[in-house]
C-alpha cells in the first residue's frame, strides 16, 4: 500500500491515518467538515489536498447511518482499488450497498475494536489499535486484493485480524460493546439526582461501571440505531435476570425463612453465573484471565510519583501486570493498586517498604 484515502477524520479515521502516515503511506484526508480534515492534517495524519489519480485503499470512517452512501459515492467515482469501512455494525451497511446495486467485489466491511470516550481528531493516536482485535467480514464476492489490502491496513495499525460473518459480528458487539454502554449509562443516570452524601461515597467500583457513560450520546444513538435488534435481544435477557433478582431481594425481606432461603439462592445463582462469565473474558495476550495479587501503595498527588513507584518496582525486578488508581475523597492523595504475580508480591512489598513507600492492606 502506497496511497490511501481516509473519508471521515474523527477519532478512528484520524487514528488510522496517523498509523498509516507514520509507516510511509501517503494519506489523503476527506471530511464534510473541512476544518476537521485540516486539524487531522495538522496533526500529521496526511494531507487534506485533493487526491490525484487512484488510491490503493479507501477507508470510510463515517457514522453507521452514512456508511453506505459514502461508500457508494467513493466506489462510483472509482477513487481506489479497494474499499473498506470501520463502522461498528456490519450487516446493515452491506445490505444497503446491495440494495443500491453496488459492485461489492472490491469492498470489505471491517471494525477495529478500539475507541475512547472522547471523539474527534484531537483524541486520535497512532497507537489506538495496537494489540486490539480488528474484525474483517469478507464474503464469497470479496476480491483477494481487497482482503489483502485490509489485512495490510490491520498490520500497519499493529492490530490483530479476526475474520467473522457480518451478522455474527453484529450479535457479538451487541453483547460485548453496545449493551455495556447502555447498562453503564443506566447506572450513571441513578447518580444524577442522588444525594450529595451518597455521591461522595463513590469508589473504584462505581467508577469502573460508569466509565463509558461519559461517551458522546449522539455517537451512540447512531450506533444503536444501526444495531437495535441484537441489542434489544441481549437487554431482554438482562431484564429477565433483573426481574428475578428483584424478586429474590424482596424475598430476603420476608419473615418467612423458606422465602429468605429461596431469595438467597436466586442472588447466589446470578452472582455465580457472573463469576463464570467473567472467567471467559480474555486476559493478558488473549489468555485466560490470571489471578493477580494486589500490592496497595499510598501516594501523594504530586508530579512524578507514579513514575517513581514504577521505577522502584522495576528495581525490585517485579513486572507490573496491571494498575488501578483510587483517589482519596477530599485529600491530595491516592491509593495505587499494583497487580502482580502472586509469587512476586512479597518481594515487591518488602522492596517498596525499604524505599519509604506506605503500603495498605
Image: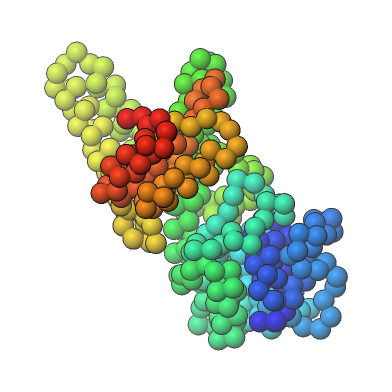
User: Which residue is rendered at x = 52% and y = 67% of the image?
Assistant: 159
Residue 320: where, in percent of width, then height? 40, 50
Residue 355 lies left or right of residue 27; in this view the side is left
Asked which quadrant contains residue 348, the reply is top left
Q: Nearer the viewer, residue 273 or 133?
A: 133
User: Which residue is rendered at x = 56% and y = 82% of the image?
Assistant: 148
Residue 127: where, in percent of width, then height? 59, 61
Residue 338: where, in percent of width, then height? 40, 42
Q: Nearer the viewer, residue 74 or 118?
A: 118
Residue 184 lies left or right of residue 15; in this view the side is left
Does residue 40 lie above or below 333 as drawn? below
User: Which residue is rendered at x = 52% and y = 76% of the image?
Assistant: 138
Does residue 304 lie above or below 233 as drawn? above
In the rendered view of the protein, which quadrant contains the N terminus?
bottom right
Instruction: Name the outermost residue toward the bottom.
Output: 144
Instruction: Name the outermost residue toward the left.
Output: 258
Amino acid at each position: 500500500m502506497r496511497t490511501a484515502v481516509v473519508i471521515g477524520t474523527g477519532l478512528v479515521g484520524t487514528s488510522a491515518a496517523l498509523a498509516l502516515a507514520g509507516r510511509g503511506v501517503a494519506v489523503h484526508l476527506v471530511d464534510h467538515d473541512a476544518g476537521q480534515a485540516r486539524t487531522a492534517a495538522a496533526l500529521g495524519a496526511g494531507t487534506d489536498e485533493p487526491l490525484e489519480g487512484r488510491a490503493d485503499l479507501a477507508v470510510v470512517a463515517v457514522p453507521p447511518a452514512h456508511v453506505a452512501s459514502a461508500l457508494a459515492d467513493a466506489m462510483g467515482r472509482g477513487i481506489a482499488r479497494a474499499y473498506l469501512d470501520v463502522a461498528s455494525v456490519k450487516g446493515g451497511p452491506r445490505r444497503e450497498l446491495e440494495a443500491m446495486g453496488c459492485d461489492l467485489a472490491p469492498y470489505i466491511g471491517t471494525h477495529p475494536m478500539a475507541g475512547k470516550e472522547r471523539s474527534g481528531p484531537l483524541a486520535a493516536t497512532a497507537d489506538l489499535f495496537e494489540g486490539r482485535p480488528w474484525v474483517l467480514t469478507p464474503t464469497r464476492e470479496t476480491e483477494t486484493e481487497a482482503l489483502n489490502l485490509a489485512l495490510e491496513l490491520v498490520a500497519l495499525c499493529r492490530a490483530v485480524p479476526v475474520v467473522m460473518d457480518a451478522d455474527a459480528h453484529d450479535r457479538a458487539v451487541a453483547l460485548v460493546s453496545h449493551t455495556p454502554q447502555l447498562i453503564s449509562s443506566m447506572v450513571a443516570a441513578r447518580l444524577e439526582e442522588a444525594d450529595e452524601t451518597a455521591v461522595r461515597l463513590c469508589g473504584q467500583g462505581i467508577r469502573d461501571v460508569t466509565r463509558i457513560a461519559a461517551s458522546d450520546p449522539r455517537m451512540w444513538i447512531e450506533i444503536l440505531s444501526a444495531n437495535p435488534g441484537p441489542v434489544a435481544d441481549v437487554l431482554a435477557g438482562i431484564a429477565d435476570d433483573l426481574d428475578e433478582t428483584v424478586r429474590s431481594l424482596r424475598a430476603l425481606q420476608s419473615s418467612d425463612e423458606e422465602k429468605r432461603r429461596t431469595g438467597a439462592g436466586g442472588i447466589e445463582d446470578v452472582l455465580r453465573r457472573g463469576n463464570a462469565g467473567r472467567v471467559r473474558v480474555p486476559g493478558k495476550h488473549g489468555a485466560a484471565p490470571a489471578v493477580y495479587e494486589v500490592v496497595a501503595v499510598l501516594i501523594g498527588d504530586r508530579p512524578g510519583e507514579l513514575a517513581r513507584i514504577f521505577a522502584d518496582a522495576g528495581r525490585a525486578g517485579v513486572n507490573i501486570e496491571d494498575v488501578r488508581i483510587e483517589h482519596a475523597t477530599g485529600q491530595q492523595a491516592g491509593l495505587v493498586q499494583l497487580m502482580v504475580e502472586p509469587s512476586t508480591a512479597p518481594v515487591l512489598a518488602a522492596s517498596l517498604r525499604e524505599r519509604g513507600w506506605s503500603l495498605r492492606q
